[in-house]
Image: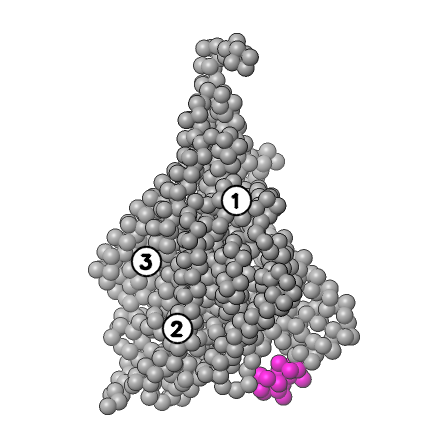
Amino acid sequence: MQNALERLYETPATRRRDDVLLAVLGLLCAVLLLIETGVWQQSRTFKGPFQELEGRPGVLVLSLDRSRIDRLVLDARGDTPRDPYASSLTLTIDGRPATKPNALHDQIGTSAGHAFSHWDRSVLFSLPAGVANDAGTTVTVRYPVRLRGWIMAAVFGLTIVFALHIHGHRLTGRQLDRLQALPAGLVVVSGWVGLGAIGVFAAVTAWGAVQGVPLPTTTIFRFGAAAETAARGLAVAPFWVLILSVLGALAAWSAWFRDSGEGVVRAGEDRVARFAARWGFVLIAALFVYLSSAQWSGLILPGDLVWASLFGLVPFSDAAGYFSDASDSVRSGVWSEFAARRPLAAAFRTAVAFVSDYRFAGIVVVQAALLAGAIMLAAAAVARWRGIWAGLAFAATMVLTVKGYVPTTLTEPLGLVWALLAVPLFVEALRRRSLLFALAALGVMALSLLTRMGAMFAIPAMTLWVAWAFGDTLLQKLKAGVLAAIVVAAAFGTSSAVQKLYATGHMSAGSNFSYTICGISIGTTWDGCLNRYKDELKPLTDEKDVVQFMYAKAAENARSHPGVFVGRLVQGALAFTPRIPSLLVGGYFGLGSPPWFPLGLFVVVCLVGAVGTLVVRREPGELAFWGLLIASTIASAAFVYFDDGTRVLSASYPLLGLFLVMGLAGPREPAPSESASPVLAGSVTAAAGVLLVGVVVLPAVAHTRAGADPRVNLAPEGAKHLVFGGPRLTGVLVVGDAKTRRTTMPVITIDQFERVVGLSGVEQYQPLATPAPPPTPFGFVYGLRVEKGVRSYHTYLVPEAVLTRPEVSVWRFTVEEMPKRPGGGDYWYRVIDAQPVTPPAPRS
C-alpha cells in the first residue's frame, strides 16, 4: 500500500521540484558557511555628537544596531568576556585610523583617539586631541557581519529534515548504513587533517630551530594572521569532536533500532578506536604546545590564564611562588612556608622543573606530555567501558578543561594528572567489582586532592563507597573499609613524609584552609578575617599561631552567628552546581561554548543518556558511586567556591566529566577483549607508582646536583640581585615595532604587552603599563635568584642586551623600585645596570 501511494503522489515532476528545492537549500547552507568566514563586510559612517559612556570620562559610545530585527538576525561578533579579541572591526575618526583595537575600557579615555573596543554590539572610542564632539566629526567603522546562530541552525536543520523527507524512503539499506557510518568517517578525516597540520607545524618549528629562533615552536606565528586564525580554530576544535561524538552515538543507536547496519557502524567505531590509540596522544600534546606557543607569541585565546602566566612565560601570583620554590629549595634543601602548605605539589613541581632543567618553556612541554598521556589513558578506559563515542567525548571535554592550565606553574595541572590517572582505575573497579582496583583508584585520587586540595569531602565519600560496594556481608564491608582507610592514611602519610623531608617549621599541609573557614564564618572570602582582625594578627609572627587563631575565630563566629555560616555554605553550593557543565567545557573561567555549539542541548542529551545508562546498564555499586561523588563535590564547593572555587575544585572535574559523557554510551558492549581493560588499569597503576617514586625522590636528587653547582656559593650582595642567566631566564623582549631581532626570547610589540598586562589584572598589585608603558625596547623577564637563602619572587624589566647573551650564566642586576600601590609590595623591578658574573671554580 505504501509503495502504491508513493508511486501515486511521487511523479517525475515532483521529484524534480524536490531536488531543485534541496539544491537551493544546500546552496543556502554553503552561502551561510561562506558568510561565517567574514567575507560580508559592512561599512557605516556616524556623525557626531556622540554619547559619553556613563562613569568613564572621555569614552564615547555608538551602537551598531539599526532595529530589533537587525539585532535578532545579524551578529556583528564583537569582543566578549569569553573572547576579548573576537572583533576585527576597524575605526577611523575624520579619516584618521584608530590604531589600538580590542583595547581595555580603562585605557580608551586617555588614548587620544588611538584605542577603541568593539564590545558586543557597541563601539567604545575617544576623540583625538583637538577634535570636537560635534556634528562636524565623523566616525567610520568597517566590520564583518554574520548571521545569528539560530538562523544557521534553522537552515541546516530544515535542509537535513527536507533531505530525509524526500530521500529517506528512496535510500537503500546500504545507503543508510553508509549514512550511519558518516560520523566515524568524519572523525578519522578530521584526525588526518590534524596530523597534516602537525606536520606543517613540526616542519616550520624545525626550520626555526635551524635559523636560531628562540622557542622555535613560535616560528609559525611569524607568518601573520593564518597562524593566529589556526590557534583560534584549534582552541575550539574539541567542540567539533563533541558534536561528532553525539552524532556517532545517535548513529549507533539508529543502527540498533533498525536492526540493520550494526556491522558497518561497528567497523567505523573500530577505525576511530585504532586511530585514537595510535595518534590521540600526538594530537592532544601538539594542540597543547601550539596553544602555549600562541601565548609565547603575545596572543590571547579564550580561557588563557594570563594572570597566572603572562605571555605563557612569566609566572605571577601563586604560580610564581611554586616556580620559584622549585629552584630555591634545591639550593637550600628546604621549602618555604608557601610551598610546605602543599608538600606533594611542591615535590611534583620540583621534579618537573628538575627534569626540564628549570626552563619554564620546558616545564610547559613536560606538563603538556603528562596531561596528554593521562587524558588518553583515561579516555581509553572510558571507551572500553561505555563505548568509543563516550571515550572520544571524554577526551575532548578534558582537553577543554585542562588546556588553560598547561602553560602555568600552578598546582592544578599536577593535580589533574593524578585525577586523570584515577579514572581508569575507578572504571575497572566498577566494571569488574574489583576491590584491588578500587583501592588503587582511591589512593591515586587522594594523591590528586593532596596535590590540589579542593573537594575535601570526596576522600571520605569514596572511602565510604569502597566499604559499601565491595562486600556482601558486614564482615566483608568492614574489611574493605579498613583497607580503604589504610590506603588513605598511606597517601596522607606520604604527604607528611615529603613535608618532613623537605620542609622546616610547623607548617601543616592545607593550613591556608583556616583563612577560608574563618571567612565563611563572617560571610566573606578568605581574606575577610585578615582585614577584620588585622590588629589582633599583628603580634602573631609564626604561621602556626595564625592558623590556630583563624580556626578559633571561625568556631567563635559560627557559634555566635550560625545563620551567617550556614547561609554562606548554601550560597556556595547553589552557585557552583548549575555551572558544572560550563566549567567542564569552558575551563577555569567557565566561559561556556562558542556560539555555534549548542551547549544546553548537549548537556540535556548527555544527562538523559546518563540516566538511561544507569537504569539499563549500571554496574553493581555504581549508583552509590555517582551519588556520593556528586554530593561530596557540591558539599566541598559550599566551602571553597567563593575563594576561587572553579580552580580549587579542578581535580574533581575528570570524574564529573565522565558522568556527563556517559550519556553517549552506545547500545552494545564494547568490542575489545575482556583482558585488555585490566592490562590498561594495571599499567596505569604501575605508571602512578613510578610517578610517585619520582615525585618523592627527584627533589633530593636535584638538591644533590645543585650542591655541586659553583654558582650557589655566591653570597648575597645587598641591594644587588644575582640572577640565573641563560635558559633559566624566562620572559619576552618588548619592542616598539615588529622588526626581527637576534635574541634569546620571543619578541612582542608594546601594544601586545599593554593588552596582556591589562587583561591579566596584575596592575591591581603594582602599576606596570599605566599610566604609560616603559620605553622600548626592554626585556620582561622572571629571574631565579642564585644566592642561597634569598627567595626568588620578582620580575625584572631589563635592558635588551641581557637577552642577547645566552652564554652568561649569572647576572648581577642593579635595580630600582617602580611605583607601588599604597601599602603594596614590589612585584617588578627596573634594572638600571646588568653585569655578567663569573662564578667561582667548581669544587674539586
Which numbered disc, 3 or 1, marks the residue that appears first in the sequence? 3
> Residue tagged by mark 2?
694
Q: Amino acid at mark 2?
A: Gly
Estimate the spatial distance between the alpha carbons at disc 2 and disc 1, rounded to whole Å: 37 Å
The quadrant in which the N terminus is found is top right
Judge depth for marks 3 and 1 and give the one in front. Answer: 1
Q: In the image, is 179 to the left or to the right of 809?
A: right
Which region of the structure is painted magenta? 533-549
Dot 3 alpha-carbon crowd within 10 angstroms: few under 14, some 14 to 19, many 20 or more: many
Q: Is residue 450 above or below residue 579?
A: below
Q: Nearer the viewer, mark 2 or mark 3?
A: 2
Q: Residue at x 44, y 64 (%)?
A: 685
**Amino acid type, mark 1:** Leu
Report, in whole angstroms, how far the alpha carbon at label 3 lies from the one at label 1: 37 Å
Which quadrant would residue 816 be assigned to in this image?
bottom left
Please provide percent x and percent y for residue 686: 41, 66
Q: Residue 458: give x, y in percent of width and height.
A: 59, 64
Instruction: Tell me the quarter of the image containing the C terminus.
Output: bottom left
Q: Residues within 10 Å of mark 1 (few under 14, many from 20)?
A: many
Q: Amino acid at mark 3?
A: Thr
Image position, residue 319 (x, y; %)? 47, 70
Looking at the image, do the residues carrying marks 2 and 1 touch, with CB atoms under 8 Å apart? no
Residue that mark 1 sits on = 664
Residue drawn at the location 74% of the way across and 68% of the way down:
564
Marks 2 and 3 sit apart, C-alpha to C-alpha, by: 31 Å
Determine if residue 98 is in view.
Answer: no
Q: Earlier in the sequence, mark 2 or mark 3?
A: 3
Q: Is residue 143 above or below residue 522?
A: above
Q: SS for tag 2? A: helix
Q: What residue is pinned by disc 3? A: 218
* Residue depicted at 43% across the width and 45% down the height: 671
